Image: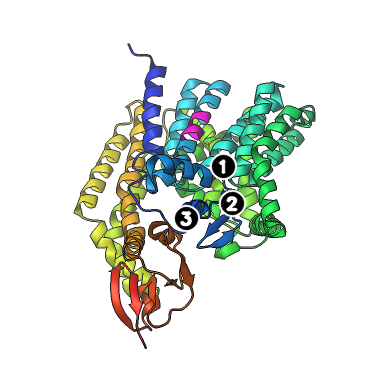
Amino acid sequence: MPNPENTRKIFLAFFIFFSSLWGIGNAPLFDEDEGFFAEGTREMVVRGDFISSFVNQEQRFDKPPLTNWLQFGSAQIFGWNEFAMRLPSCFASVVWMLLIYIFTKRKLDEKTAFFATLIAASSLQITIVGKAALADGLLNMSLTGAMFCLFEILNQNHKKYILAFYAFTAIGFLAKGPIAVLIPGAVFLIYLLKNKTWKSFLRLFNIPGLLIFLTIAAPWYVLEYLQTGEKFISGFFLNHNVNRFQTALEGHYGGILYFVPVLLLGLLPFTAVILKSFSKIRIIWTDPFFSFLLIWFAFVFILFSLSGTKLHHYIIYGYSPLCVLGGWYAASNKRLPIVWPSFILLILLAIIPFLIQGFIPKINDEYAVEIIKGVASEFDIYYAVTMLLLITILIIIWVKKDWDLQIRMAVVGFIMLFTINILWMPRLGALLQQPVKAAALIAQEKRFKNIVIFNHYNPSFHFYSRLYASEREPIAGEVVFGRKPSMKNYKIDTVYYEKYGIVLAKVGVK
């Protein structure tokens, strides 16, 4: 008979591939964030400057450049396309999943590692954000590696874990900044306080480890400061890090409970399994490893709940410990709520595209109305039939409670990944971003100069068109890329492209 452990490994390899790498070039880059990173990479090459980041010729201090550097390397092999821009994040997400598996197996057992990795790879939010052309895949990979090494440092003085901790932290610091140091540092101190011991405190003060950190992370920070001076300090550290916690930057605000629904939705299809694990809270709190995981998640949740700026993907920094706890609970319990959460979500996803047009009279946003009018063209009968088939399979899994739990969870996880990666994201891309890409390619083909953009922000337009634009109101004779409702007060001489509320046109005299 085949070895169950080897069978699980083979299945997980396929599952991780499907979650993190499948179809990464099937949708255009999504604005703002994916377009922002990709255009920042393109302008690094145009400027011949791999230290500072510019988007539409405006210097930006949002993130360190590791993602841009990796995107550039990927583009040299695969070209300047969506696949190349997303590939670094995807590889980082694969490593992220492997770290969850390897460390959970080491601390608990192989079966628990299988369930923990299955839950992580199936997660709705992880499969979306983990393969996006952003810095978050790299940060989550490095943060997970750093935190697992940190637990080993807390319990034994293995030099290799100390060196690995500093390497992972440095990668995160170069990918997204101080948050890669803040989370491990805070969790480390809270864990020591909980256990009323400081024996592990001095272990982190390791000269070779500090040298590894400085060798990886410090050069860019020094070079950026030498190149831009005080603008770097105020723009990167003060505005995009300190102020991000004090105020809602760029309109990204939310209440104290903002991340509660994000968690409930983002961890599907196994949200209920993870929540059930907290029925064992006494065991979790008293066990050294489980309490470390709980502190890790709790700190992330509280930190970003109190932050002025709220973005849905912030909470993912605390997903790895939740997935391990969920895997531990699943490995020791046969009857789990694994179907009904996905069933509800799939029912909603199946009917929303066909009901949403009925809400048009109640929507005041004219651009949103234009998009909704296009929904019927993208979410077609093939989509409806496929969703019906997936829901039918879920019902069968729901009824067949005597089937092996691993098989039931695997099928439910695959249905979630298929729904998101095959059915939804390409269609959303066609609806929201394909018009931007198509307009940009026309602008590039016609070699327009002095294009004007106003009342919206689509950095992917610059990436696809390889053109810059003025962000202001247009004057007669200028070519404008914009949203159709924003141009209703202007006389249009020539329309070069129009679809789903996006317009590329020449403005005439009023």
Residue 138 location, x and y as percent? Answer: 53, 41
Above or below for 410 versus 236: above
Q: How crowded is mark 2: few (under 14 residues within 10 Å), some or many (20 or more)?
A: many
Task: Tell whether label 3 touches label 1 (CB within 8 Å).
Answer: no
- Write the residue at 34% across / 37% down: 414
On the image, the x and y values in percent for residue 487 come to 38, 78
- Which residues fall within the magenta stretch? 94-99
User: Circle 3 sits on which residue?
Assistant: 39
Residue drawn at the location 31% of the way across and 54% of the way down: 427
Residue 139, which numbered label? Answer: 1
Q: Name the residue under label 2.
A: 63
Frontmost residue, 132 versus 227: 227
Q: Which residue lies furthest to the top in this view?
A: 1
Q: Distance between the residues labelled 1 and 2?
A: 11 Å
Nearest the eye: 298 or 205 = 205
Going from N to C along the chain, the mark reached first, 1 or 2, is 2
Q: Is residue 86 visible?
A: yes
